[in-house]
Amino acid sequence: MRAARSLMFVALLPLFAGCQLLESSPQAPSTAGLTRMQGELGMANGKLVFKPCQGNTLYAVHDSGGTSVMQEAATLAGTQHQVFADLRGRVPSAKVADGQAQLDVQQLYRLERSTSACNSPDFQKLILQAGGNTPNWSVKVSGKGMVVERAGQPALALPYLEEQLGDGRFHLSSEANNQRVELWIAPQRCVDPSRPSVQFMSAELRVNDQVQRGCAYFGGARSD
């Protein structure tokens, strides 16, 4: 069986329609000794491998954190047989049997069917990015504040306060410009079919009395 076709068999798993928010996952484990990495997941010699955005090293992926990374990647891969991955893991000093480096994946932030995500100019500047659709909305959070964009509305650039709520949940709020804006974040698997992507936080945006739901992930400026 050709390696390039391996992801397709697992890809029969359903891709949920709409942004689906599932039950909250347990609080994230400590990230001590782990490295956050971005790159491409694909198949080589019948194994799931990871290639960082910078560099040519191929890592054999071991799902030591029980993230279901193989199934998640296969669901999104489609005909291109690879997906962008934003994850956290450990590279053991010992190599696998064939001498290849190994990546022990402990946590997933985002998987996306994209060929350009490695080149995102905003990623390293952002603390958080959230968004949804029907209608479209997005929130970009940085050290300078947050920018809220909604279909048919002018963009709002606002200062914010953050409140930690426990179990990985937190809340951003602003009352500038005579508007009450809240962004609620929870550690839940969330599917955004418009990208398409799987993100591992859910988001709820409240602007005055309007509520919109979507997905979220940490930018490069924050990696809880």
Image (cartoon, rainbow, N blue to C red):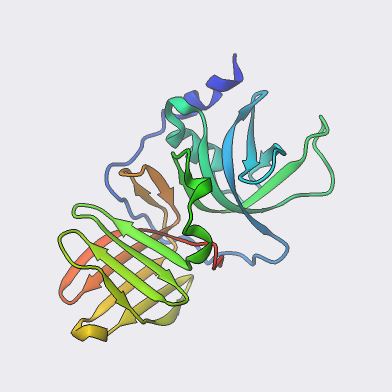
Toward the top, the furthest residue is 1
Position of residue 145 in the picture relative to residue 177 (left or right): right
What is the number of callouts on the image?
A: 0
Image location of residue 41, percent across then percent down: 57, 38
- The residue drawn where x is 43% and y is 77% is 144
- The residue drawn where x is 42% and y is 82% is 163
Image location of residue 178, percent across then percent down: 19, 85
- The residue drawn where x is 31% and y is 75% is 157
Quadrant of the drawing holding the N terminus:
top right
Viewer-proximal residue among 155 and 87:
155
Viewer-proximal residue among 178 and 182:
178
- The residue drawn where x is 51% and y is 48% is 119
Query: In the rendered image, which quarter is residue 94 located in?
Result: top right
**In the image, residue 178 above or below residue 154:** below
**In the image, residue 212 above or below residue 55:** below
Position of residue 27 in the picture relative to residue 97 (left or right): left
Query: In the rendered image, which quarter is residue 170 located in?
Result: bottom left
Toward the front, the furthest residue is 121
Quadrant of the drawing holding the C terminus:
bottom right
Image location of residue 100, percent across then percent down: 78, 35
Viewer-proximal residue among 134 and 178:
178
Image location of residue 14, percent across then percent down: 36, 35
